[in-house]
Image (spheres, helix red, strand yellow):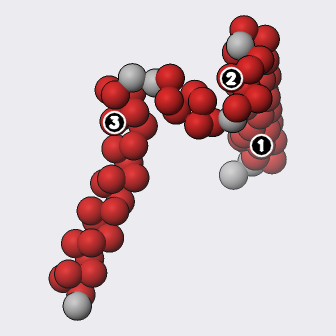
Amino acid sequence: MSKRRDRKSFRKSMRNAGCLSALVVLLVVVGVIVLLAFIAHDPSGAASGINYWWGRLGDGARAILHAPIDFFNALLTFVEQVGG
């Protein structure tokens, strides 16, 4: 490969890495802003911790959030039964 092509691919990869880094930083900033908005809206709930928010969720939302845990527990049980 020529040096010029190597430089272009390096610049392109650095530009892509920079865009990805900027996107991650932007998502973190938006997450912090949303979290602060929730805390400002209901400071007593924020002081109660995650259990307060978990209790306020509906059954459907709780089931969706708990589904990956249930899946991996079932997978672990299956592997233990097959292996043992």
Going by the numbered disc 2, the residue's amino acid type is Gly
Q: Is residue 59 above or below residue 39?
A: below
Q: Residue at x 39, y 23 (%)?
A: 58
Q: CA distance from mark 2 to mark 3?
A: 21 Å
Residue 24 placed where, x, y %? Answer: 72, 31
Residue 11 placed where, x, y %? Answer: 80, 36
Disc 1 secondary structure class: helix
Q: Nearer the viewer, residue 31 or 42?
A: 42
Label 2, residues with CA under 10 Å away: few <14, some 14-19, many ≥20: some
Q: Which residue is mark 2?
A: 45
Residue 18 placed where, x, y %? Answer: 79, 32
Going by the numbered disc 3, the residue's amino acid type is Ala
Q: Which residue is mark 1?
A: 10
Q: Residue at x 63, y 36 (%)?
A: 50
Q: Which residue is mark 3?
A: 63
Disc 3 secondary structure class: helix
Going by the numbered disc 1, the residue's amino acid type is Phe
Number of marks in the rendered image:
3
Disc 2 secondary structure class: helix
